Image: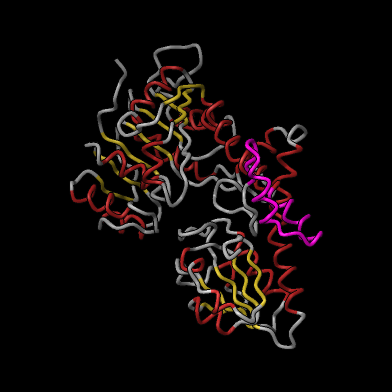
């Protein structure tokens, strides 16, 4: 009979992954303590509120808090299991910044006792789970840490990467298959006992390094396919061919499924994770590196096209619709739309640029230096603009009447108005 976790669980990081995971587990009758360095996030969870937009999450948080199963704190508590769900950005040289993961491991170390489980959910380069084990072991020499081929460890350490889509997190966190990689087989089995509480998909047990690499490969695969679509868009544009028609026709082939091009690739995962593979094997990652370079350049191309269109007018105004990294969420992490807007504002300092996003109420800090940017409602922005640039296909933008766009230069980077 397979184990199912019983006890108290602490989750470090109350963000887009940590908080939904906390809700999924707390609503299965487990006491969960959310830990975050941001007092505002902690206060929101304690009130039963969500500090960001994600469908169905607010109901889950309020319910779990009302049941007394979910609480939050800035201090790491004692628990029977710990999940690390903190950010893993990259450094200037595009290697992984593991400082948040290391800090979380060091926070956990003093609280550990024999039999505890430590799971790293943060997307990480191969070998990071072993580093977590080593960091904890250096601080707790009294505990026997897991080692491959040995038995009798005091602590069980594993990696279980998230694989959910923003906007569908509360569905996919339940229904998707999970990969659980342990430093030893027993570590994998112990960690899997946590995910058996709520996961309806298959739980696949493996070693930690394979689990780490699998998550990176998933996102690199997406990145390569997006780069192909973006490159086809560039080529079609240069040949004065409608890329959306080309893709529509090509996708009628039974074994072809080309993705849609866009202004770039955003979010915390896809623009970041492929670089972890490149840094792990730089001489062998030529395709993955090239795909990243194609997608990284895309915002520059889009901005250049808008600047070129602006030259048609003596005194143009521009409306940029969308700031988030994808449609119908408030997540602006690594958003190509923000980069495009910044590049346009920098290139056209005398031009008024109206920016609209139904999920963003304050100008992102990356754009605060530009004095020619104004946040506006979508209809007002479009009405005042000579050039309309669609950067994110939010539903209100897609539903906009085409009569509002009449007589304006339209640059639809998403094909939503095609």
Q: Residue furthest bottom?
A: 314
**Range shown magenta:** 229-258
Residue 386 place in picture, x, y as percent:
65, 82
Q: Give the residue drawn at x 69%, y 38%.
A: 279
Above or below: residue 293 compared with residue 321:
above
Residue 255 falls within the magenta-colored stretch: yes
Q: Position of residue 83 (x, y in %)?
A: 39, 37
The quadrant in which the N terminus is found is: top left
Residue sitting at x 73%, y 35%? 285
In the image, residue 116 above or below residue 152: below
Which quarter of the rendered picture does the C terminus lie within? bottom right
Name the one closer to the observer, 129 or 385. Answer: 385
The picture places residue 19, in percent across and down from the top left corner, at: 36, 47
Q: Tell me residue 415's x, y (percent).
A: 61, 60
Q: Is residue 146 left or right of residue 309?
A: left
Does residue 31 appear to the left or right of 407 in the view shown? Answer: left
């Amino acid at each position: 009979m397979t184990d199912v976790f019983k006890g108290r669980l602490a989750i470090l990081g109350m963000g887009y992954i940590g908080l939904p995971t906390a809700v999924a587990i707390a609503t299965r009758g487990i006491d969960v303590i959310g830990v975050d360095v941001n007092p505002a996030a902690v206060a929101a969870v304690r009130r039963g509120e969500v500090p960001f937009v994600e469908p169905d999450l607010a109901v889950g948080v309020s319910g779990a808090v009302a049941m007394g199963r979910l609480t939050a704190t800035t201090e790491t508590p004692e628990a029977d299991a710990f999940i690390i769900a903190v950010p893993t950005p990259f450094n200037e040289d595009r290697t992984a910044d593991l400082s948040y993961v290391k800090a979380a491991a060091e926070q956990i170390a003093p609280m550990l006792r024999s039999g505890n489980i430590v799971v790293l959910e943060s997307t990480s380069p191969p070998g990071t789970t072993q580093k977590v084990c080593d960091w904890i072991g250096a601080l707790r020499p009294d505990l026997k840490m897991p080692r491959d081929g040995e038995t009798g460890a005091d602590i069980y350490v594993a990696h279980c990467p998230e694989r959910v889509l923003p906007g569908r997190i509360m569905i996919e966190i339940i229904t998707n298959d999970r990969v659980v990689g342990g430093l030893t087989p027993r570590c994998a089995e112990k960690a899997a006992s946590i995910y058996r509480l709520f996961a309806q998909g298959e739980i696949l047990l493996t070693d930690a390094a394979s689990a780490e690499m699998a998550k990176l490969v998933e996102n690199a695969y997406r990145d390569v396919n997006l780069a192909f679509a973006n490159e086809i868009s560039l080529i079609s544009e240069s040949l004065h061919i409608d890329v959306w028609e080309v893709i529509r026709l090509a996708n009628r082939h039974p074994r072809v499924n080309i993705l849609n091009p866009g202004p770039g690739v955003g979010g915390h995962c896809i623009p970041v994770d492929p670089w972890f593979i490149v840094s792990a094997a730089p001489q062998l990652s030529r395709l993955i590196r090239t795909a990243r370079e194609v997608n990284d350049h895309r915002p520059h191309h889009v901005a250049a096209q808008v600047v070129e269109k602006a030259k048609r007018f003596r005194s143009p105004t521009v409306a940029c619709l969308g700031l988030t990294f994808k449609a119908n969420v408030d997540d602006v992490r690594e958003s190509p739309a923000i980069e495009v807007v910044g590049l346009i504002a920098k290139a056209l300092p005398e031009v008024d640029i109206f920016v609209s996003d139904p999920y963003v109420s304050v100008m992102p800090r990356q754009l605060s230096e530009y004095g020619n940017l104004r946040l506006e409602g979508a209809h007002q922005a479009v009405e005042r603009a000579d050039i309309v640039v669609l950067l994110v296909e939010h539903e209100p933008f897609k539903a906009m009447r085409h009569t509002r766009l009449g007589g304006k230069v339209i640059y639809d980077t998403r094909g939503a108005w095609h």
